[in-house]
Image (tube, grey):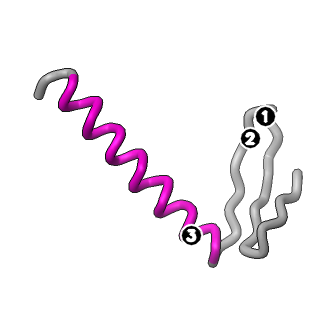
Amino acid sequence: MTKEEILKKHNEMLILWNAWMAEKKKHEIHTFENEQGNIVRHYPDGREVVI
């Protein structure tokens, strides 16, 4: 694969992953680290709580 093909595939996979995560957030509680280094819990109703 060429560098351009790899970058194109990477972008396609990133788009699919973002769509998948957006759908999961509608039904599940997710815990992650934000840009500031805080642990955040995201709830299906849209609220986020720093824990």
- Per the rendered image, the range of residues in magenta is 4-26
* Quadrant position of residue 36: top right
Other residues around mark 2 within 10 Å, as few (<14) / some (14–19) / many (≥20): few
Residue 2's spot in the image, x, y percent? 13, 23
* Quadrant position of residue 49: bottom right
Question: What residue is shown with label 2?
Answer: 34
Q: Are marks 3 and 2 in contact (CB under 8 Å)?
A: no
Q: Residue at x 68, y 62 (%)?
A: 30
Please tell me which residue lies in front, 22 or 42. 22
Q: Mark 1 belongs to which amino acid?
A: Gly
Question: What residue is shown with label 1?
Answer: 37
Along the polypeptide, which appears first: circle 3 or circle 2? 3
Question: Which marked residue is nearer to the observer: mark 1 or mark 3?
Answer: 3
Q: Residue furthest left?
A: 1
Residue 12's spot in the image, x, y percent? 32, 46
Q: Mark 3 belongs to which amino acid?
A: Lys
Residue 26's spot in the image, x, y percent? 64, 74
Circle 3: element type: helix
Question: What residue is shown with label 3?
Answer: 24
Along the polypeptide, which appears first: circle 1 or circle 3? 3
